[in-house]
Amino acid sequence: MSEPDCAVVKFGLTLEDREIEASARVPAGPVRVVDLLPVLHNLASAVVAVGEEQVREQGKVISCGPGCGACCRQMVPISEMEARYLAALVDAMPPARGAHVAGRFRAAVARLEELGLIAKFRAMARHTPTERFEIARDFFRAGVACPFLEDESCSIHPARPMSCREYLVTSPPELCANLTVADVEMVPLPAKPSLVLYRFSNGVGEDRWRHLPLVLALEWAAEHAGDEQPKLPGPEIFMNFLRRLAHLPKDWTPPPAQL
Ligand code: SF4
């Protein structure tokens, strides 16, 4: 299959006192938002790098790295588009590998059923932040690993969801492993691109909240395979995302979704 025609978008983004100046190569013609996810993921990593630089300037050391999967047993929220993206990623794996990963997803869902959490997980976006925290705490206590976690490292690191990119700490890994939330020192970020992505299924922003726990990604994507997905020119989608990101209030918690 031939590569789509691409456009280079040059942009500047001011986050706190830092300026990100970069360019992004995006498909020029109409595409689905999910087709732009690798570019949006790179943008998220650039935003996270600003936070990393700030804590390093303060002399702090980031604890996260390969071999530490302490946070990968937490309830990881992803956007609906990332669920489609991850399902496509698993589909594109060599058959034996794909079957192994898909089996791990099924095992995680079976464990949720055993724990009596499956209905709460499937309705996750409708809960209040406090309810979400309580459900996530019960899930974490059960120790269900992310299906992509291999040898305590992320097996899809370049394609990992935005919320995984945004989770960085300077506190000891044991605190993440025990989920002593009050003591975990997160790296403060100048913006959270995941919060834009949850409302970005239409490629414009301000859509309804569309997020779910990562362990339900394959189940959700299979159920919604036939859904219509809007298409817009790649540069337009990218600039819409950038505008939403630039205007996102810092330290803001999403309300329950209105479905
Ligand atoms: S996708 Fe990767 S980084 Fe994210 S929870 Fe899973 S293993 Fe961890």
Image (tube, rainbow, N blue to C red):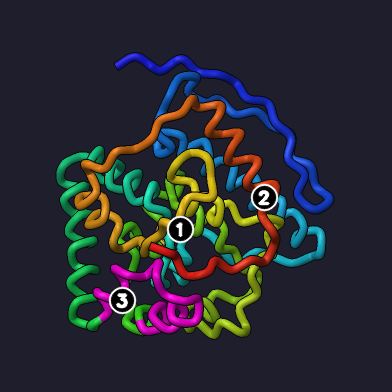
Res. 52 in view: no
Vertical arrangement, residue 251 with respect to residue 88, above or below: below
Q: Name the residue under label 3.
A: 120
- Label 2 vs 3, first from the N-terminus: 2
Q: Check disc 3 and give the amino acid type.
A: Lys
For marks 1 and 2, give the one nearer the viewer. Answer: 1
Q: In the image, ligand 1 is in what quadrant? A: bottom left
Q: Distance between the residues labelled 3 and 1?
A: 16 Å
Q: Is residue 58 magenta?
A: no
* Mark 2 crowdedness (10 Å alpha carbons): few <14, some 14-19, many ≥20: some
Mark 3, ligand 1, within 8 Å: the answer is: no
Count neighbours of disc 3 (C-alpha within 10 A) and say few if under 14, some if 14 to 19, many if 20 or more: some
Quadrant in which the N terminus is drawn: top left
In this figure, which residue is indicated by the disc labeled 1? 209
Q: Distance between the residues labelled 1 and 2?
A: 26 Å
Numbered range of the magenta stretch: 117-138
Task: Let me know if residue 250 appears in the view.
Answer: yes
Of the residues under marks 3 and 1, which one precedes in the sequence? 3
